[in-house]
Amino acid sequence: DKPRVFVTRTIPKAGLDRLREVCEVEVWPKPKPPRRDTLLDKARGCAGLVTMLSDKVDETVLTAAGDDLKVVANYAVGYNNIDVAACREHGVAVGNTPDVLTDATADVAVLLMLAAARSFTPAAASVRDGGWKTWAPMDHLGMELAGKTVGVIGLGRIGRAFADRCHGGWGMKVLYTANSPKPDADRDLGAKHVELPELLANSDFISLHCPLTEATAGLIDANALHQMKTTAVLVNTARGEVIDQDALHTALSGGKIFAAGLDVTTPEPLPTDSPLLELPNCVVLPHIGSATVHARSGMALMAADNVLAGLRGDPLPHGV
Ligand code: GLV
Ligand code: GLV
């Protein structure tokens, strides 16, 4: 019998085809994720799971899956949805999809930085809804990027790609926080490793590129927002939980910072009556950081390769 693999959403065909050569593959066909009880049911007897960031993989899922389960391949670079320690205890390997989505995600951070800095959403809306009457010398005044200081919180792969764009495109000075200094970035970009308070106080643009962990949950709270410049623009393409959203709403509506651009929120999606969505200085996207044809098909192949290696008992090519 071929090993069974459950894939919790439809992913690009190239990855599914690669899995089907070796495995009996079931793909959850609906546009919404399987409900929790459905996931537990489908996982039963599987040797591999391909999961999305919307699927929580914890002790309960691992127990439901049973002893055949060898590998969980997350279709994402972030893996905060997976209890890695529990997987280890069950002898289940865990993989993710780094690198292939780095440029795509850094591009969305730039997109949000520009959109928030230049009031893109209300400006574009005014053209559609007839609010724009005539060229206006005082409307939609935004922030320039050239020569400004950008603060990158978490200078990993995506943070570095974002810093490269800021430095190369607009000659920005780069400050960053990271668990350890990055000599390459210091040398290539003149970047400076600083503590968070220094970054918050001195950056014109602040972009989050850290994983969601206990240490980063709620990192950008009311206190952090108060330390920022009133002209600061905050960008989040990491995880919604890194920002205290109530505090962000207060800061944005009270003019404590200039604007924010969010690709990630808590929850996803935000309810359509969320107060954040009423603010002209907050632009929100539906978690599209990795949503390019190139990145998503590459992620599918990487997830498939992780599953196949896990089934053979080999180290995962992209293990966490
Ligand atoms: C998306 O958020 C990812 O982690 O890949
Ligand atoms: C406006 O269009 C300008 O050229 O400054």
Image (spheres, rainbow, N blue to C red):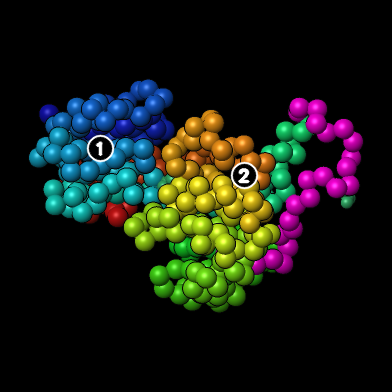
In primary-sequence order, the first of circles 2 and 1 is 1
Q: Residue at x 20, y 54 (%)?
A: 85
Residue 282 numbered mark, or none: 2
Region of the chain picked out in magenta, as a range: 128-151
Q: Is residue 249 above or below residue 155?
A: above
Residue 76 picture quarter:
top left
Residue type of the residue flagged with mark 1: Leu
The residue nearer to you, when weighing 271 against 164, is: 271
Image coordinates for residue 205, horizontal then vertical, percent: 62, 60
Q: In the image, is the residue at mark 2 within 8 Å of ligand 1 by its beta carbon?
A: no
Which residue lies under the disc numbered 1?
49
Query: Extreme left residue here?
Result: 67
Q: Residue at x 79, y 50 (%)?
A: 141
Q: Residue at x 32, y 52 (%)?
A: 318
Question: Local crowd at mark 1 within 10 Å, few (<14), some, or many (≥20)?
Answer: many
Residue 36 picture quarter:
top left
Residue 4 numbered mark, or none: none
- What type of secondary structure mainly makes up the magenta span? loop
Q: CA distance from mark 2 to mark 1?
A: 36 Å
Residue type of the residue flagged with mark 2: Cys
Q: Secondary structure at mark 2?
A: strand
The residue nearer to you, when weighing 121 against 161, is: 121
Query: Extreme top residue here?
Result: 30
Q: Is residue 55 visible in this depiction of the protein?
A: yes
Quarter of the figure that contains the C terminus = bottom left
The verdict on residue 149 being magenta is yes
